[in-house]
Image: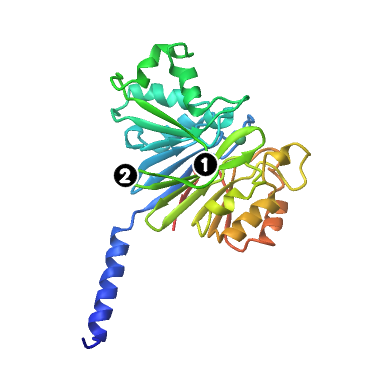
């Protein structure tokens, strides 16, 4: 068959145009840019927005639900709540969302994915049972664990993922990997929507190099920036220093870096952290604030 340059170009342009027209609009909103302190920031929480609908809620730290409401997100649009770990500053608002759901239009079951447990921490399934089970603190709402709930059923899943583990949802794909956060079972998440992607590190020292596996060529990397360089002897077993964040971002080919989970020990040292990270990572770097909405592209 003869090669027809014009036909080929037309096909290519039409393909590009239809890809552009059908590509989802994806953004990540920081609901809470802080850690556990009382410092004017909500604790860790994010929304993955796809075509103007809140499709995933990641972490539910203190103050997150108020920010969720302010953002205009609707509980009935969520396909998932994902919890990186069960520290208070990441998980304490969970029951508030479930209670609020009773008064919302939501009726569809809601999956809640989080880590497995150990001696010091409950699994995600146990956490939900400790809240809503028959002997739970909020046993008056125990029907949320059943299919004939008055509002909607919650379906917890405790995940351990030494290797990348995937789950598919209607509007996005989720990749999960277990990360090191001292004795706390913890997860990092990657969301892929077509060719747009976001990684949320959660709290981790990344001592075992798991984040690089998850973050290859990711558009947006949310790194929890809980400590400044050279901070303490204990906290650096739990969190990434700016140097470690820079190395992960650079090795993974991250396009844009957001520094979240900001705490007093890093606030006021932004210039220093930036200088350290910029030596290694050459892409754009943003310091997170509550309600900052970042387009994923
Ligand atoms: Zn934290």
Relative to 112, residue 256 above or below: below
Residue in front for this viewpoint, 272 or 126? 126
Query: For the C terminus, which image quadrant?
Result: bottom left
**Residue 161 badge:** 1
The image position of residue 254, as x and y in percent, is 55, 58
Residue at (37% x, 21% y) in the render:
145
State the image quarter where residue 151 is shown. top left
Q: Which residue is mark 2?
A: 170
In screen coordinates, is 23 left or right of 137? left
Residue name at image x 39 percent, y 45 percent:
49
Q: Which percent across, then down, holds residue 148?
A: 28, 19
Looking at the rendered image, the disc whose residue lies closer to the viewer, 1 or 2, is 1
Q: Residues within 10 Å of mark 2 (few under 14, many from 20)?
A: few
Question: Badge 1, how many Cα within 10 Å: few under 14, some, many 20+?
Answer: some
Q: Nearer the viewer, residue 139 or 263?
A: 139
Task: Locate residue 192, reporting x and y percent.
Answer: 42, 51
Q: Report which quarter residue 16 is drawn in.
A: bottom left
Question: Which disc, if any, is residue 125?
Answer: none
Can residue 35 be seen here? The reply is no
Position of residue 167 measured from the top left corner of the image (x, y, whole percent): 40, 43
Gap in Å between the C-alphas at discs 1 and 2?
A: 22 Å
Mark 1 and mark 2 residues within 8 Å of each other at the beta carbon: no
What sort of colour scheme is used for the picture?
A: rainbow
Q: In the picture shown, does residue 227 fall above or below 131?
A: below
């Amino acid at each position: 068959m003869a090669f027809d340059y014009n036909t080929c170009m037309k096909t290519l342009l039409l393909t590009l145009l239809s890809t552009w027209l059908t590509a989802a609009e994806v953004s990540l909103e920081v609901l809470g840019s802080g850690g556990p302190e009382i410092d004017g920031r909500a604790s860790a929480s994010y929304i993955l927005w796809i075509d103007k609908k809140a499709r995933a809620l990641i972490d539910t730290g203190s103050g997150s639900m108020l920010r969720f409401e302010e953002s205009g997100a609707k509980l009935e649009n969520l396909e998932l709540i994902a919890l990186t770990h069960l520290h208070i500053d990441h998980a304490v608002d969970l029951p508030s969302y479930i209670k609020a759901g009773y008064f919302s239009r939501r009726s569809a079951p809601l999956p809640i994915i989080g880590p497995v447990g150990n001696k010091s921490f409950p699994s995600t399934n146990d956490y939900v049972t400790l809240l809503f089970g028959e002997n739970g603190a909020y046993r008056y709402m125990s029907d949320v664990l059943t299919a004939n709930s008055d509002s909607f059923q919650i379906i917890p899943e405790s995940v351990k993922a030494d290797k990348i583990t995937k789950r598919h949802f209607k509007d996005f794909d989720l990749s999960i990997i277990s990360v090191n956060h001292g004795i706390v079972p913890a997860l990092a998440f990657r969301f892929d929507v077509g060719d747009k992607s976001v990684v949320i590190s959660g709290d981790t020292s990344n001592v075992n190099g798991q984040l690089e596996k998850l973050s290859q060529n990711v558009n947006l990397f949310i790194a929890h920036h809980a400590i400044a360089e050279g901070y303490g002897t204990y906290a650096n077993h739990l969190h990434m220093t700016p140097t470690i964040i820079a190395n992960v971002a650079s090795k993974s080919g991250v396009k844009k870096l957001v520094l979240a989970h900001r705490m007093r020990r890093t606030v006021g040292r932004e210039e220093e952290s930036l200088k350290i990270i910029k030596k290694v990572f050459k892409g754009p770097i943003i310091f997170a604030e509550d309600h900052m909405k970042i387009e994923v592209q």
